[in-house]
Image (cartoon, rainbow, N blue to C red):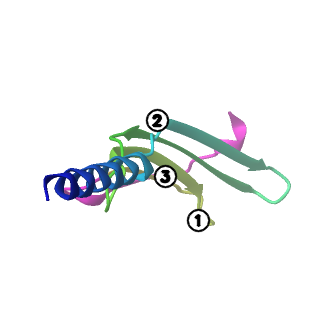
């Protein structure tokens, strides 16, 4: 009887070790940053954006502790609209909108 128990215990231990080795490893997330700018004087177009993410590792709902960014659009009425934002798990998307009158982002 004790040999059967030892064999059963050995099989169960082997299965546990195989299961642990086969478990998916936590993915590593890297910090990121990107930006772009579009200027088209002929069509009087301007917009730009930059964003950066601070990583927190693997999670179910949101994989970054905080994402910050800014984007701007030159509006048809001549104002430059700029939105600065923070995105985090606690507050979600938190924008700050600013308008600059008589802006000409194409001149700089």
Residue shown at 45% from the left, 40% from the top: 28
Residue shown at 17% from the left, 56% from the top: 5
Cα distance between the residues tagged 2 and 3: 35 Å
Q: Which residue is mark 1?
A: 77
Q: Nearer the viewer, mark 1 or mark 2?
A: 2
Q: Does the magenta-highlighted stretch encompass residue 38?
A: no
> In the image shown, does 17 or 63 lie closer to the viewer?
17
Residue 26 visible to the viewer: no
Q: Which residue is mark 2?
A: 31
Horizontal placement of 11 versus 107: left or right?
A: left
Specify which label sits upstream in the sequence, 3 or 1.
Answer: 1
SS label for mark 2: loop
Q: Evaluate if marks 2 and 3 touch, with contact meaning CB atoms under 8 Å apart.
A: no
Specify which label sits upstream in the sequence, 1 or 2.
Answer: 2
Q: Which residue is mark 3?
A: 101
- What's the magenta region? 88-108
Cα distance between the residues tagged 1 and 2: 37 Å
Q: Which mark is residue 6?
A: none
């Amino acid at each position: 009887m004790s040999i059967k128990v030892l064999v059963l215990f050995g099989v169960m231990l082997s299965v546990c070790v195989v299961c642990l080795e086969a478990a998916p490893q936590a993915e590593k997330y890297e910090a990121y940053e990107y930006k772009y700018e579009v200027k088209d004087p002929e069509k009087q177009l301007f917009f730009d954006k930059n964003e950066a993410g601070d990583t927190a590792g693997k999670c179910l709902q949101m994989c970054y502790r905080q994402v910050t960014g800014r984007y701007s659009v030159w509006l048809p009425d001549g104002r430059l609209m700029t939105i600065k934002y923070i995105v985090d798990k606690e507050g979600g998307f938190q924008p700050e909108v600013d308008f600059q009158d008589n802006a000409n982002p194409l001149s700089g």
